[in-house]
Amino acid sequence: MRTVETQKYSVQQPLIETVLAWIKNNDIAIPEIQRPFVWDASKVRDLIDSLYNGYPIGYLITWKNPDVRLKDGKVAEGKKVLIDGQQRVTALTAAIVGEQVINKDYKRVRIKISFNPLEDKFEVFNTAIAKDNNWIADISILFRPEYSFLNIVNEYCEKNSIQNPDIIFEKLDKLKKITQRQIGLIELSGDLDIEIVTEIFIRINSQGVVLSQADFAMSKIASDERNNGHILRKCIDYFCHLAVAPDFYDFIRDNDREFAKTDYFQKMSWLKNENDDLYDPDYSDLLRVSFTSEFNRGKLADLVSLLSGRNFEKKTFEDEIAKQSFEKLEKGILNFINETNFKRFLMIIRSAGFISSALIRSQNTLNFAYILFLKLRDLKYSPDEIEHYVRRWFVLSVLTGRYSGSPESMFDFDIRNISSKGISDVLKDVESAELSDAFWSFGLVQNLETSVASSPYFLAFVASQIKSRDKGFLSKDITVSDLIEYKGDVHHIFPKEYLKQKGLKKSDYNQIANYVYMQSEINIQIGKRAPGDYLNSVFEQCMNGTKIKYGAINNLDDLKQNLKENCIPEETRYMTADDYPEFLKIRRQLIAQKLKEYYFKL
């Protein structure tokens, strides 16, 4: 006889006003208002319009935190964690309650939804609406207890010369009653195995923004007030906010005075004067680095389990494990936000030539480099050793795309290996497997055969030039570093217009082996000329002392050194479009060789 399993979730239909009350009373863990709100205003408008017309707006999905056993044997009941529907709930709070939200640029804004009862139409508030009496500029006033509903109706009728207010009353009353609409709520049982909840979480795909494991973990952190999770979460959010918008410091100090009194706020106060954008972590980055460096694990699902007090052997949830996990996570977070750690790490990345965020494509590569820095520092490696290993590992990861596939799994694999075997042995093993002679001679050369200017291989080449203090192409004094710092441009060695005239396609003339950092004025001087024209003239001006036509180099040795630094073969001085394919082949080999020398000097 088949056993009928107990259903692991319940389906409810709470009123929207009930959900809003949960938020107000902190009965449900949701994103704090300081988190960036990723919906645009038109989606908020559409949500309100759907509610007004009685259309469904999808389900919210919550998970009742597991009950944890306390030291005295009692059981603490878990709080609900919102794992899907965060954007909709925040949108309702913004439009109906009138709360401000933080947009993608970390600016605090009000999203006002306007309503025209004569046309049954909603719109995002704008200056035209502000001048039009047919519109109620901000619907949130209908839901505020200090406003008289009848006064709002009468004022609207008076402004629009409406003799019979009944129609307007009916429309506004219908709008006001959207908080009486039901919203679907699926509540996952608290005794569900954490892995199952994680799997459900990953599979969620609604009209809203699909959440990440970091969102899940952040909601879990915020829901545990016994372990000060709500304060810890603020620490994470505020640090990431300040990293992008330092002027937000004053807002925190003046408007969240309770948090401003904490050590967390003091430890991140250095950001108020910091405008460096090389590494602007979001909450996912901060959480991942803090967790992996401190727990020697790479999968955030494990963090949710540990913060829930999961005993992996007994398959129970224990308060002491949750407490220890929060303490460990707090240590990782404080290490992350520490000014000395953060700035020293960035100094190491810059010392490898990556002086601008424009040169870094993979945030996860940067994240693991910081994990490695914190781990080696915790293991008491010397400063010289830390600099060497972090630089090497970072550049290796860039060149091999180590964290571009399944970063969580690779984080987990790498941190466990490094923790058990030591960084020296692990690095040697990875270099043997990933950076063989075949890689430098063939694999990397093939990878350079692309037209994508943001290719990590080209960016690593630029970093190698910065590291070597190389000059820009045909520049006498201006370095590649100068050109990056002052927003210099990438130009073509074989000019684009020249190759287009010869019938080459965009994918041909935009090969990265044809790219070089060059002063704009030199590029203008070159115009549409072939290298066999302009570069040969440069050789002549250096050998014969003729008038300088291109750049400022007038010494042959300096010219040859400049070509070497930019991996341009000297025979390019004789080349035309017919030689272009051979030029690309040679230059790819030279770039790969330069990258090899650069890497092994790190």
Image (cartoon, rainbow, N blue to C red):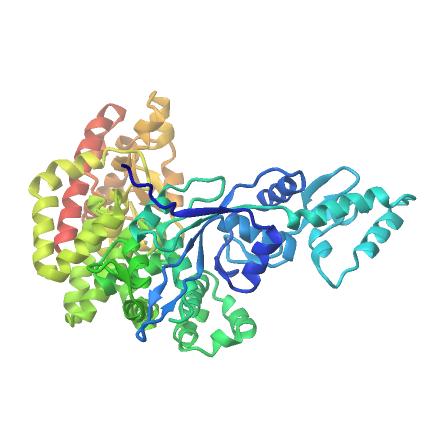
Above or below residue 542? Residue 77 is: below
Q: Residue at x 28, y 46 (%)?
A: 459
> Where is residue 517 drawn, in percent x and y?
32, 45
Residue 545 visible here: no
Question: In this orientation, which residue lies closer to the viewer: 537 or 177?
Answer: 177
> Where is residue 398 drawn, in percent x and y?
23, 48
Above or below residue 69? Residue 432 is: above
Residue 520 visible here: yes
Q: Residue at x 63, y 42 (%)?
A: 51
Question: In this orientation, which residue lies closer to the viewer: 153 or 408?
Answer: 153
| Quarter of the C terminus within the rendering | bottom left
Above or below residue 591? Residue 469 is: below
Question: In this orientation, which residue lies closer to the viewer: 602 or 551?
Answer: 602
Residue furthest to the right in view is 163
| Quarter of the N terminus within the rendering | top left
When asked about the image quadrant of residue 22, the answer is: bottom right
> Where is residue 231 drawn, in percent x and y?
43, 70
Q: Residue at x 46, y 40 (%)?
A: 206
When asked about the image quadrant of residue 436, the answer is: top left
When asked about the image quadrant of residue 167, the answer is: top right
Residue furthest to the top in view is 503
> Where is residue 48 drawn, in percent x and y?
63, 44
Above or below residue 372? Residue 535 is: above
Residue 78 relative to residue 43: left or right: left
Q: How many marks?
A: 0
